[in-house]
Amino acid sequence: MSVGVTENINLSLGVNSIILRARPNKDCPRFTDTQELSIKPARYNTDFQRASTPRKTMFYGVYMSQPSQNELDIMRTTAAYETIPEIRLPNNPYSGKLTLGYWTNHEPLNLIAIMHKKQYTEINPYSMEVFHAYREHLANGDKNLMQKSIAFYDFLADEFSKKDIRGNYDYKISALFSEAASRNSVDGIIYPSVRLGGMSFNVALNELAIKKLKLDSVEEATVQQEGNNVSISINAFTKCNNQSTFKLEDVPGKQ
């Protein structure tokens, strides 16, 4: 993919940022191995996904800039909608377990941001802040470069916000861009979560960036959908201390 010279939105996540990565339990009654919550092995990545190609795997997670209790709830909800297709269907009864791994970084993460979807900048103050900072930066430079960069990233924003996916080929453009961008000193991509209407962000980190992360804690949750209402209740928790294995402890009264 080649579009000539454009100005990227470069964003750095500071040390100890929280990235939430989720995995449905499905046939596994309870996870105990840190690797089970980490990056998907490349050999299993056979399709295009929003930010990864069949030739390359990425670590997908959910991020918010200042995770208060309310934002942690939004992060959990985002993780559920991103990983459980069944709850995206209206009036589709569902009940299942979801394991939530909270990762933190011990080095800054250097990301390229896709923040141009106008409706998302109106919903999320962080998107608006990054978007306006980028526009102000461009305004001080070459006018043609500014117009070209804005047009290119407007196009990418549409690609990264596709909601009705007919097949994995619908992810091809965003996936190829992510593969090309996540090289050299770039650790990955950050973009608003289409599944939650831009209220939170997804990050996709390359394999080398995983060395900057450690698993801090794990929750096991029950996700239920009745009608159009989705509930997430935490029934087990543990701190991990960056160990290779962990043991979840049941929350009293939630077994």
Image (cartoon, rainbow, N blue to C red):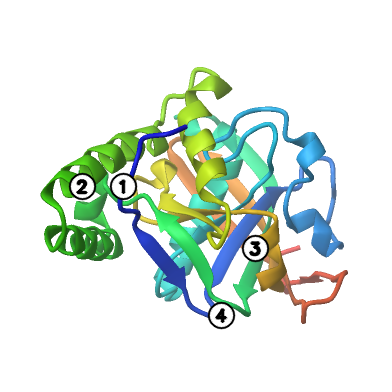
Mark carried by residue 34 = none
Name the residue beneath numbered marker 1. Answer: 6
* Kind of residue indicated by mark 4: Asn
Mark carried by residue 16 = 4
Query: Reading the chain from its start, which is encountered first: label 4 or label 1?
Result: 1
From the viewer's perspective, is 234 left or right of 1?
right
From the viewer's perspective, is 8 left or right of 211?
left
Callout 1 touching callout 2 (CB < 8 Å): yes
Q: Position of residue 152 (x, y in %)?
A: 29, 38
Query: Reading the chain from its start, which is encountered first: label 1 or label 3?
Result: 1
- Helix, strand or loop at disc 2? helix
Question: In the image, is residue 160 above or below residue 36?
Answer: above
* Kind of residue indicated by mark 1: Thr
* Kind of residue indicated by mark 2: Leu
Please say whether residue 213 is visible from this viewpoint: no
* Cα separation between marks 1 and 3: 24 Å
Disc 1 crowd, CA 10 A, few/some/many (<14, 14-19, 20+): some
From the viewer's perspective, is 40 left or right of 191?
right
Could you tell me which residue is drawn at 16 percent across and 43 percent down? 147
Name the residue beneath numbered marker 3. Answer: 209
Name the residue beneath numbered marker 2. Answer: 145
Q: Position of residue 229 (x, y in %)?
A: 45, 43
Q: Nearer the viewer, mark 4 or mark 1?
A: 1
Picture mark count:
4
**Residue nearest the viewer, comparing 73 with 170:** 170
State which quarter of the image contains the C terminus. bottom right
- Helix, strand or loop at disc 3? helix
* Kind of residue indicated by mark 3: Ala
Disc 2 crowd, CA 10 A, few/some/many (<14, 14-19, 20+): some
Could you tell me which residue is drawn at 40 percent across and 71 percent down? 65
